Image (cartoon, rainbow, N blue to C red):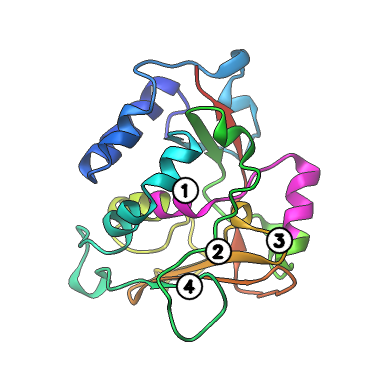
Amino acid sequence: MNLDPTDILRTSRRFYAQHHLADWAEALPATASFADGEAAPSVERSFTHAFAFPPFDVQMAGLDRLIDETARKPAPVPDNQQYVEPFLADHWTKTPNGKVLQSTDDPGPRAWGAYVFVFAPNPVQKCWGMTGKQIREHFQAKDWHGLTVPEYLVLQRFYCEKYGDHRFFEKPEDDSGAHSLWLIDSMDDKNCSVALGSNRGLNLQACSITNRDSKRAAVAGRIVLLQ
């Protein structure tokens, strides 16, 4: 994706319009530049992709609708890759409760206005096998952000429609067409949402931040405000 704010806005606004998220599209500026003159490509050499998001409160107000649009509705993929009813839980369980864990205590720059999440479309190699807490500490030391639940839901659907499967990554680790992720910026002081996407649908639940899983990846990025 071209890291030009005009192109990013066009792509993001089109996605929201196609998924009955008109209020998300309307919350984006009509035209934009990066705040404080920051050039997105200079944020980090490996952060080569970007997507625009409305302010955090708009996202959370529309979370139920977002889940319907990105985790339930059929996608233009083969029948054996279609979405089924998602497994949603705000704790680690074998029984879904329809809730998700997303910390709202300190959303940081996401609360200040519309923004672009500039990120690497592949896992952070150093973070394989780390606990959620260790990944958060590694990200904080680098001044990186991880994914929130709303950002993940948008991007996994965007990539499903782009690639025709549930890989999420630009360069999949294997040929399973699936992905497993820590959503680091969903985390509270005890738990973190984790996601598994595959042809069985989305599994989104929360586990302890002291948990580690050698097969679960983490995606890093930066928040760049729009003006």
Figure check: 141 above or below 113? below
Q: Amino acid at mark 1?
A: Glu
- As drawn, is 154 to the left or to the right of 114? left
Name the residue: 56% across, 45% down: 120
**Front tag of 1 and 3:** 1
Which amino acid, mark 3? Cys
Q: List the residue tagged with mark 1.
A: 151
Visible residue check, residue 170: no
Which segment is the magenta one?
135-154
Mark carried by residue 127: 3
Question: In front here: 57 or 139?
Answer: 57
Residue found at x 48% / y 64%: 100
Q: Is the residue marked by circle 4 packed among few (<14), some (14-19), or many (20+) residues within 10 Å?
A: many
The CA distance from mark 1 to mark 3 is: 20 Å
For the residues carrying marks 2 and 4, which lies nearer the camera in this image?
A: 4
How much space separates mark 4 and mark 3, taking CA atoms? 24 Å
Q: Amino acid at mark 4?
A: Ala
